[in-house]
Image: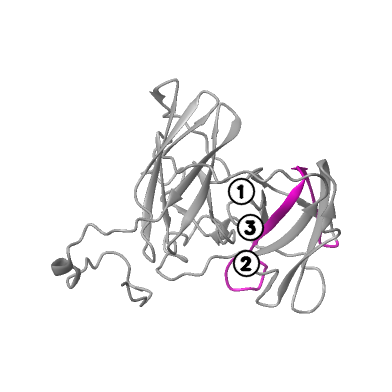
């Protein structure tokens, strides 16, 4: 089974016009089914199943990044992000604890059902009872502070193109060069599109033990966004603690290329321009 994770990620899904995942509760014949979609505030167990094309709960998954299922919870206003790894029983029911505050939440299951060709992300809405105090979107920023750690974001999100982002981790103003592998990578980045929480597949460049990827301070990712604003959540591990750095980033609206140069667009990226007409 160890053959199945960490390989072939470099180009998978990274092309212009890729649709984000997580916008559907059912896709490719697989459906996310929660035991309850009305929850109370507080820390509580949440349980669910993935129903397969045969109508039965799926019990066989191909691990991706060491886990058979990655589960993301975020409130609709992008607060309260949690990336957790539920445990499955023999009948295919998954359980995990979430810390939920009142409001409308979106839950995502990032899966690769055995026998299906590739990964998919299913998303479902849940309502958490109680007085909801929706928060405005945090301002766009390229620096995130997490306790003693500072994470700096470099690179541009280019609409419809494979875009490289580099996150640089420092602690008390010193670069962190001994990041710990966490689920077969030095960092995991989740990108959610503001407005519909479209879930972007983000792929780390390089992995621990490949002979070229250093354990910090830089972690590189490839992502292919549509135009818009994104919330980015970076999970990284250092000193045995996993922390999450959060950013708000907009795609770049002006290209550095001149009109004259645009006829000879660089060929090293963006093979699949979306065909949208600008202006
Ligand atoms: Cu995960």
Residue 34 falls in image quadrant:
bottom right
The residue that label 2 is drawn on is 23
How much space separates mark 3 and mark 2, taking CA atoms?
22 Å
Query: In the rendered structure, which segment of residues is drawn in magenta?
Result: 91-119
Q: Nearer the viewer, mark 3 or mark 1?
A: 1
Work out which quarter of the rendered image holds the N terminus and state it. Answer: bottom right
Give the number of the disc on residue 78.
1
Q: Nearer the viewer, mark 1 or mark 2?
A: 1
Specify which label sits upstream in the sequence, 3 or 1: 3
Taking 192 as reference, is 265 above or below it?
below
Q: Is residue 88 visible?
A: no
Give the SS element for disc 1. Answer: loop
Of the pair 229 and 46, the residue shown nearer to us: 229
Taking 1 as reference, is 174 above or below it?
above
Taking 40 as reference, is 243 above or below it?
above
**Residue 10 in magenta stretch:** no
The residue that label 3 is drawn on is 63
> Could you tell me residue 25's position as x and y percent?
70, 68
Specify which label sits upstream in the sequence, 3 or 2: 2
Q: Residue furthest top?
A: 172
Give the SS element for disc 2. Answer: loop
Ligand 1 within 8 A of label 3's CB?
Answer: no
Left or right relative to 62: residue 225? left
> Could you tell me residue 208's position as x and y percent?
46, 43
Left or right relative to 155: residue 56? right
Q: In this figure, what is the number of numbered marks?
A: 3
Give the SS element for disc 3. Answer: loop
> Could you tell me residue 260's position as x and y percent?
13, 69
> Could you tell me residue 116's position as x and y percent?
63, 73
């Amino acid at each position: 089974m160890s053959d199945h994770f960490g390989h072939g990620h470099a180009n998978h899904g990274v092309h212009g016009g890729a649709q984000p995942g997580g916008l559907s509760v059912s896709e490719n014949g697989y459906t996310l089914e929660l035991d309850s979609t009305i929850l109370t505030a507080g820390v509580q167990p949440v349980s669910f199943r993935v129903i397969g094309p045969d109508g039965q709960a799926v019990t066989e998954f191909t691990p991706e990044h060491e886990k058979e299922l990655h589960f993301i919870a975020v409130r609709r206003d992008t607060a309260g992000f949690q990336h957790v790894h539920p445990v499955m029983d023999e009948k295919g029911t998954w359980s995990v604890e979430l810390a939920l505050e009142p409001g409308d939440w979106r839950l995502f299951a990032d899966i690769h059902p055995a026998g299906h060709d590739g990964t998919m992300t299913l998303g479902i809405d849940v309502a958490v009872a109680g007085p909801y105090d929706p928060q405005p979107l945090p301002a766009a920023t390229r620096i995130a502070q997490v306790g003693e750690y500072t994470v700096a974001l470099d690179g541009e999100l280019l609409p419809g193109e494979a875009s490289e982002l580099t996150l640089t981790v420092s602690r008390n103003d010193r670069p962190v060069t001994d990041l710990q592998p966490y689920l077969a990578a030095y960092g995991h980045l989740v990108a959610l599109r503001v407005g519909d929480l479209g879930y972007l597949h983000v792929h780390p460049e390089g992995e621990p033990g490949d002979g070229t990827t250093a354990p910090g301070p830089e972690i590189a990712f490839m992502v292919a966004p549509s135009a818009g604003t994104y919330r980015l959540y970076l999970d990284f591990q250092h000193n045995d603690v996993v922390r999450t750095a959060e950013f708000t980033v907009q795609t770049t609206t002006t290209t550095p290329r001149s009109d004259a140069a645009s006829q000879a667009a660089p060929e090293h990226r963006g093979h699949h321009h979306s065909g949208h007409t600008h202006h």
